[in-house]
Image (cartoon, grey):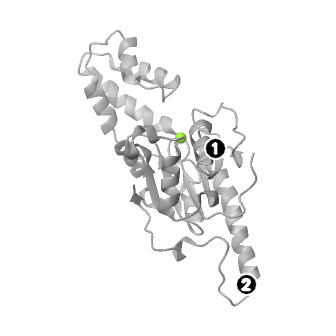
Amino acid sequence: MTPAPSHIAAVCFDLDDTLYPQSDWLHGAWATVAARAAHDGVNEQAMRRALEEITSEGSDRGRIIDRALERLGAPHVPVAPLVDAFRRYDAHVLEPFPGVRAGLTRLAAHVPLGLVSDGDPMIQRSKLAALGLVDAFHVVVWSDKHGRRHRKPDPLPFRRAVDLLGVGADETVFVGDRPDKDVAGATAAGLVAIRVRTGEWVGHADPDEAWASVANVAEAIDLVAGVLEGAAERGARHVGPGVRGQASSTPASTRKSRKPGASR
Ligand SMILES: [Mg+2]
């Protein structure tokens, strides 16, 4: 583990399995895909089961729908309408992990917040809306908008977030669940990383380069907020009573006007 940062100017988050359980979204998406496959004579229950099973073998291995059809002996069924149903699936309502909404508000009282996410931007945007978190972030970076080769751990989306937030990489904390993408990518781009042990990567070893490894996002927020609140208190004490001081972590409200909800 690396030492705690001496100064925190911004906090960025991953989306899937960091702010909410991705499996909640996938269950609904696979049900929709299976229902669409039934139009082509595929057994809906069997298709749903195959999709869930293949996902549990690793959701980022790709071709999940094709592999499910192959497994059911139905490779002739056209895959394009099923991919389309997957992309258009809208969960409408998703529940963040406990403490996320209040925690983000707590952090935003001190520093601006960012989101950096891989995946189809249309899908990722609909997840953020279903979570009710569209306005929670000052900056949102969808790495796929820069090309799939720039998905995490590529440094580009991390650097883009830091640039848009107007802060230094080394004073930005990144919170994410995947050691190989979130922690490795953030630290390679110069950010300070916290690993959350939630989601399908929970069994993977902690990376050495993380500042901390915690059980969930609420603990990560607590850790960062503790540093920020301690710094604010020290700043107020240092300046003395009756004088409006500048804490070491500049409150978001005093930065150049930056409205939450911007998406890049
Ligand atoms: Mg994730």
Q: Nearer the viewer, mark 1 or mark 2?
A: 2
Q: Which residue is mark 1?
A: 196
Q: Position of residue 13 (x, y in %)?
A: 55, 51
- Whether residue 92 is visible to the viewer of this picture, yes or no, is no
Q: Secondary structure at mark 2?
A: helix
Residue 190 seen anywhere in this rendered image of the structure: yes
Please tell me whether residue 185 is drawn above or below residue 69 in the rendered image.
Answer: below
**Which amino acid type is shown beneath numbered disc 1?**
Val
Identify which residue is drawn at 58% across, 58% down. Answer: 11
Neighbor class of circle 2 (other Cα within 10 Å; few <14, some 14-19, many 20+) is: few
| Residue at (65, 44) in percent of width and height | 195
Residue 89, label in figure: none
Q: Amino acid at mark 2?
A: Val
Q: Provide residue 22's location: percent of width, then percent of height.
A: 49, 38
The answer to whether 219 is drawn above or below residue 244 in the figure is: above
Q: Earlier in the sequence, mark 1 or mark 2?
A: 1
Q: Residues within 10 Å of mark 1 (few under 14, many from 20)?
A: many
Residue at 71% over, 80% down:
236
On screen, residue 182 versus residue 264, left or right, reads right
x and y percentages locating residue 235 in the rendered image: 71, 77
* Marks 1/2: CA–CA distance: 36 Å
Extreme top residue here? 73
- For the N terminus, which image quadrant? top right
Quadrant for residue 108, please give it.
Answer: bottom right
Q: Quadrant of residue 82?
A: top left
Residue 222 left/right relative to 100: right
Q: Secondary structure at mark 1?
A: strand
Residue on which disc 2 sits: 239
Label 2, ligand 1: CB separation under 8 Å: no
Q: Residue at x 37, y 47 (%)?
A: 126
